[in-house]
Image (cartoon, coloured by chain):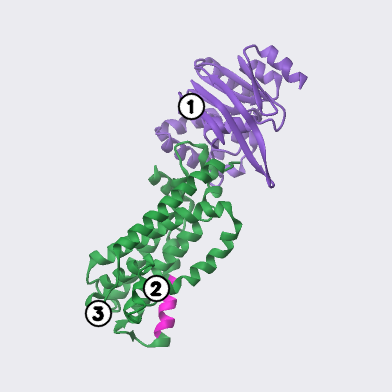
């Protein structure tokens, strides 16, 4: 169970402050797949970062009752100067996994081949997405935090992710930030619409998408 | 976990040895200049040994302090993993500098000792205790400077100057013994001086008369750490990660 209690986030903006999130309340149960909907700049990524503990809320609490992945996106979680293998080794250490198992899974899932010996900063966004998914799937989190922009992979990769996340790990939770109705519809069973700093929770995806269209 | 981070840094810096070589070069050159300017001895102690023993701890301080500027911002992408805290950044960077400086010291002492230019330490205990105090105090200063550097750009510019100005108060090139008796107690307010005096006493033994006050060092270090930790908490709340 992940619980957000009255989460506020301010960012400094010139001399003033920008109130990005104005009291978000939500709970994510085991196996729930939440879509975060909202326009650009509505605070989707901010909320994902707060959930993942990358940044801390200005006020309010985030309680994590299950293991949560780091927010999967292009930038975070990697050391650009290190190779794919080095990143895998680093992640296997800090998450306490056997490096050899992790490496085998990453090689198999990401299909990056010799590219894994290159620094991550030379990767294209699709390649980063493959590496990020491979690593986080290998760690076996109970809940995955995903920034939609990372769903850019080709058809084959999309299919693989779908298979790994739904068929093999149907019991896991998912929090997915997106503004694409198709992706939300195919991955999620609940949705939160973020607008002007407040979040509205919908148990029905179609209602959520309707509401999102009205914005 | 800290060790893991450490190895990562190790691999990143292929030339880890540079950490050691730089203070060596500096200390060596400064020592030679002083030797040329002032002759072989000053106040009854060998000048090369004296300068080296002062300069290497000083480089530790200078490097540690410069390296901790903006350390949080630079490493922030690692915060994506919740196991890693901002203190890991600080401690890892500090340990690298500390190990580098200590290796440099050991290396140069051994080499010079081999040529009969460097004495065997009279008291290993004092030498190590002095180093330890010096390091503890430096770390406590880093705990303050690192978060402050995130708040203000000015600090970054002022710091190099500040580290130069503090040299006379750091015990690097002088001993309290050489000062008029009236001035001596004031010097002991600087934790660096106490630590340096202990290092010197460990090296030269009874050839020097050390003035030091361990409790001042520890108390100042504790106060600095407390302030530093509070500042770090503030910074963590405000840190924006890309």
Q: Where residue A32 sits: x, y (%)?
A: 54, 16
Quarter containing the C terminus of chain B: top right
Give SS at disc 2: loop
Rendered image quadrant of residue B128: bottom left
Q: Is residue B131 left or right of residue B159?
A: left
Q: Residue at x 41, y 60 (%)?
A: B138
Q: Where residue A203 sits: x, y (%)?
A: 62, 12
Please state the extent of the stretch shown in magenta in the rendering: B25-35
Q: Within 10 Å of the Cα at label 1, are there few (<14), some (14-19), or many (20+) other Cα atoms?
A: few
Between circles 1 and 3, the one closer to the viewer is: 1
Q: Colour of chain B?
A: green
Look at mark 2 in the image and give the residue it sits on. B172
Q: Residue at x 48, y 20 (%)?
A: A1
Nearest to the observer: residue A108 or residue B179: B179
Give SS at disc 1: strand
Q: Dots 2 and 1: beta carbons under 8 Å?
A: no
Inspect the magenta stretch and tell me whether residue A153 lies in it: no
Spatial CA span between label 1 and label 3: 62 Å
Give SS at disc 3: helix
Nearest to the observer: residue A90 or residue B155: B155
Look at mark 1 in the image and give the residue it sits on. A63
Q: Residue at x 46, y 47 (%)?
A: B230
Q: Give me the chain letter of mark 3.
A: B
Spatial CA span between label 2 and label 1: 50 Å
Could you say which disc has been placed on residue B207 in the image?
3
Taken as a whole, is the magenta stretch helix, strand or loop?
Answer: helix
Nearest to the observer: residue B173 or residue A88: B173
Q: Colour of chain A?
A: purple
Q: Where residue A35 sits: x, y (%)?
A: 62, 21
Looking at the image, the residue that sits furthest to the front is: B182
- Say whether disc 3 or disc 2 marks the residue closer to the N-terminus: 2
Q: Is residue B33 left or right of residue A57?
A: left
């Amino acid at each position: 169970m992940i619980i957000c209690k009255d989460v506020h986030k301010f960012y400094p903006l010139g001399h003033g402050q920008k109130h990005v999130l104005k009291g978000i309340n939500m709970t994510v149960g085991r196996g729930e797949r939440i879509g975060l909907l909202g326009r650009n700049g509505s605070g989707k990524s901010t909320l994902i970062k707060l959930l993942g503990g990358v940044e801390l809320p200005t006020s309010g609490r985030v309680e994590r009752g299950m293991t949560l992945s780091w927010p999967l996106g292009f930038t975070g979680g990697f050391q650009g100067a290190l190779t794919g293998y080095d990143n895998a080794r680093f992640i296997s250490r800090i998450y306490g996994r056997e490096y050899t198992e992790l490496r085998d899974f990453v090689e198999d899932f990401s299909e990056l081949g010799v590219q894994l010996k290159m620094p991550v900063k030379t990767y294209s966004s699709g390649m980063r997405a493959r590496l990020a998914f491979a690593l986080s799937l290998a760690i076996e989190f109970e809940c995955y935090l995903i920034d939609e922009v990372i769903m850019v992979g080709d058809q084959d990769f999309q299919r693989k992710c779908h298979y790994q996340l739904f068929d093999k790990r149907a019991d896991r939770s998912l929090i997915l930030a997106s503004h694409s109705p198709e992706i939300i519809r195919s991955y999620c069973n609940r949705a939160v619409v973020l607008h002007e700093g407040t979040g509205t929770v919908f148990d029905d995806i179609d209602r959520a998408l309707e509401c999102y269209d009205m914005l | 976990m800290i060790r893991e981070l450490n190895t990562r840094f190790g691999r990143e810096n292929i030339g880890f040895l540079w950490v050691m070589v730089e203070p060596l070069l500096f200390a060596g050159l400064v020592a030679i200049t002083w030797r040329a300017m002032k002759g072989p001895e000053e106040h009854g102690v060998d000048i090369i040994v004296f300068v080296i023993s002062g300069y290497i701890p000083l480089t530790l301080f200078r490097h540690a302090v410069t390296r901790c500027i903006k350390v949080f911002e630079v490493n922030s992408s690692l915060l994506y993993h919740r196991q890693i805290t901002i203190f890991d950044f600080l401690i890892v960077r500090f340990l690298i500098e500390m190990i580098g400086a200590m290796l440099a010291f050991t290396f140069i002492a051994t080499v010079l000792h081999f040529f009969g230019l460097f004495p065997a330490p009279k008291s290993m205990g004092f030498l190590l205790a002095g180093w330890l105090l010096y390091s503890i105090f430096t770390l406590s200063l880093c705990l303050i400077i690192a978060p402050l550097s995130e708040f203000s750009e000015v600090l970054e510019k002022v710091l190099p100057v500040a580290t130069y100005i503090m040299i006379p108060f750091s015990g690097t090139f002088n001993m309290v013994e050489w000062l008029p008796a009236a001035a001596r107690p004031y010097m002991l307010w600087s934790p660096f001086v106490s630590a340096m005096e202990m290092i010197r006493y460990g090296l030269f033994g009874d050839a020097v008369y050390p003035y030091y006050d361990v409790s001042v060092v520890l108390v100042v270090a504790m106060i600095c750490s407390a302030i530093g930790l509070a500042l770090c908490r503030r910074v963590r709340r405000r840190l924006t990660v890309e």
